[in-house]
Each structure stands twice: as structure tokens, then as C-alpha cells.
Amino acid sequence: MIRFPAEWEPQAAVLIAWPHHTGDFRNLASVEQSYSFIASTISQYQPLLIVCRDTEHQRHIEPQLKTLKNITFIHATVNDIWVRDTVFLTVENDSKLQLLNFKFNGWGDKYPHQHDNALNHNLLKAAPFKGVNTVDIDFILEGGSVESDGIDTILTTRQCLLNPNRNKDLNQQEIEQQLFTHFGAKRVLWIDQENLTGDDTDAHIDTLARFCTATTIAYTASDDPQDPHHDSLQSMQSQLQALRTQSGEAYQLVPLPMPKPIYDDEGQRLPANYSNFLIINNAVLVPIYDDPNDAIALQRLTDIFPDRTIIATPCRPLVHQYGSLHCMTMQFPAKVLNL
């Protein structure tokens, strides 16, 4: 019996990869301010693993953190810091936890990915991962492309999982079978939804719609008819309204408004959204963008998670490299790591 734990279940740790000056961020100082806030906040609640290049990089990072308590550094090279899509996904297999190493191809061969695809094998050399049960899977999949309700249901988009730039020889039924086999899923809820402008992932579900409980979904919404995303997000809302839980009930749906458009220096709109939040032990980190809608998103997520502390998390610098809070983190369920 295989089960894909939900994000709100007890966690052992969260992993991030600290950006390096050779990476793609133009304003590394502002990005590191966000990273420092995120790292220091997570480590107050649970262990944090920080992937960095080497001892020199680690020494650069350490003074930026409020404390080194609950923080473990792991030396490894990455192409990109979006570990949601490159690091192990964890399943429960006959009551034993197992790390799944899916193949990663740079979001459809858009970017170099040799270090990212090798990252999980390098993590196995680090103390927290030594001896942990792992399996390599010959299937391309990113963690940001699948949402689990913790029972038997996967939520995803056709635009990503069925894109021929991932597993081009497999049809929808065959891809569903992969999800059934590796995650123990019995249902796949498919959403037809184009990606947010500036999103290079081919519409990852974690920018669009998120399980908050087995019966509650928070989703990116637009009530501005002038926004180019408005019509497609209205269509997604209708699709979500048509979905049913295992017991045949409609899901409780909570719209998260989009922040006003944020643009890069070339005038390209960036994929800022509030659905890219991170659930950790006793708290939820919510991306904010210095926007009036920050307060609305924070309040709506407070209503969904009354027993967790809701933490406004500055992420405006992160979207300049086309991702946000959930994209840069990966949680590990309780007891899976050596911590």
C-alpha cells in the first residue's frame, strides 16, 4: 500500500538551495534577504537543510542567518535553486517511508540541468540522507506539478504532465498509471489551465491550485476582466467547482486574488501569485509582494489554517527568476531523515 503524504502532515525538515553569485539572479542581495527571512523562519519551527556549493559559500551564508540552530548545510552543486522540482518526493510504502528520485529534464529541456538531475544522488552522501530507502524512477516529474490530498488523489494540469517535452512517448492513461504506481493514487484530477505569464514550468499546479485539507482547495483567481489571465482563471474556477471529493461532495474552494502585475527590466510580466505558499509544522509561509492583495491572501489562508501561524514572507525578489516560495522549498515527512 503506497500513499503520497500531504504537505500539512508532520515534517522532519525542509530543504532549500541557497543561490550563488554564478546563478541567474541579477540582484542577489535582495534575493538573499528573502532567503535569510525564509531560512531563519523555518528553522524556528523545524530543522532546515541548506544546500550550498562549498565551505566558502557556507561561510558567506552563515552570517546572514539569525541562528544556526536547527540548520544543516549540505555541499552540492545545482543549476537552479528551485528544489521543489528536483529533490526527492516522499511516499509511505507499507508504513515505511521511501524517497522517490524522478528524472528531471530542466522543465522540458528549457535550461541546463545536469547538476539538478544528479542532486538527489549527491544528497545521499550527506548524513541526513544516509541509509534512507530510495528508488530511482525512469519517469520525468517535477514536485511542483503534482498536489496530493494525502489520501488517494493527485491534482495536476494537462499542460504540464501531458506536455510532449516531458514524457513524449506516454499518453494520458499511461501517465496516470505512473501516478497510480508510484504514489498509490486512485484518482487524478486533471485541470486544463495555461501557465501564468512568465512561468516556465508549463503550468505547475502549485502556482494555480493547492490542497489545504483533503476537502479544501485554495486557488489563484482574478476578478479583473482587464487582466489577460482573467478568462483562463475563470475557466479553471469552473473546473474546480465541478470536481468532487472521494465522498462525492464539492470541494470547499478559496480564491486567492492575484497581486497587481510585476514586470522585469525587459517588461516581461512575472508569475507572482499567492498559491505558492508553504505549509510547515505549526505554520504556513505565504508569499507577499508589497501589494494590497497581500492582506486578502493572508486573511483567507488564516481562515483555512486556524491552528497554524500565518507568516507573511517577502518574495518579490524571487519572482524575478520566475518562481516563488513553494518552488524554492521541499518538505520531508516526519521520521524519513536522519535528524
Image (cartoon, rainbow, N blue to C red):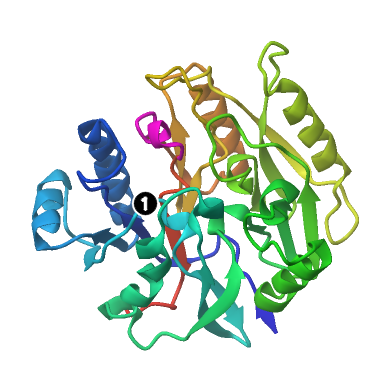
Residue in front for this viewpoint, 119 or 253: 119
State whether residue 174 is above or below residue 17.
below
Does residue 106 appear to the left or right of 301 in the view shown? left
Residue placed under numbered mark 1 in the picture: 80
Position in image of residue 291 (x %, y %): 46, 18
Q: Quadrant of the C terminus?
A: bottom left
Neighbor class of circle 1 (other Cα within 10 Å; few <14, some 14-19, many 20+) is many
Does residue 135 appear to the left or right of 317 in the view shown? right
Q: Which residue is drawn at 39% across and 28% down?
A: 316
Q: Residue at x 80, y 46 (%)?
A: 251
Question: Does the magenta segment cover residue 204?
Answer: no
User: Would you identify the image quadrant in which residue 73 lies?
Assistant: bottom left
State whether residue 91 is above or below residue 154.
below
User: Would you identify the image quadrant in which residue 30 lies?
Assistant: top left
Q: Is mark 1 on a helix, strand or loop?
A: loop
Q: Quadrant of the N terminus?
A: bottom right
Question: Does the magenta segment cover residue 320?
Answer: yes
Does residue 55 appear to the left or right of 106 in the view shown? left
Position in image of residue 43 (x %, y %): 29, 55
Q: Residue at x 27, y 32 (%)?
A: 26
Residue in front for this viewpoint, 6 or 164: 164
Decide if residue 281 is in sight here. no
Q: Which residue is drawn at 48% across and 55% down?
A: 106
The magenta span reads: 314-323
Does residue 43 appear to the left or right of 279 in the view shown? left
- Tally the marks: 1
Residue type at the position of mark 1: Asp
Decide if residue 235 is in sight here. yes
Position in image of residue 55 (x %, y %): 10, 62
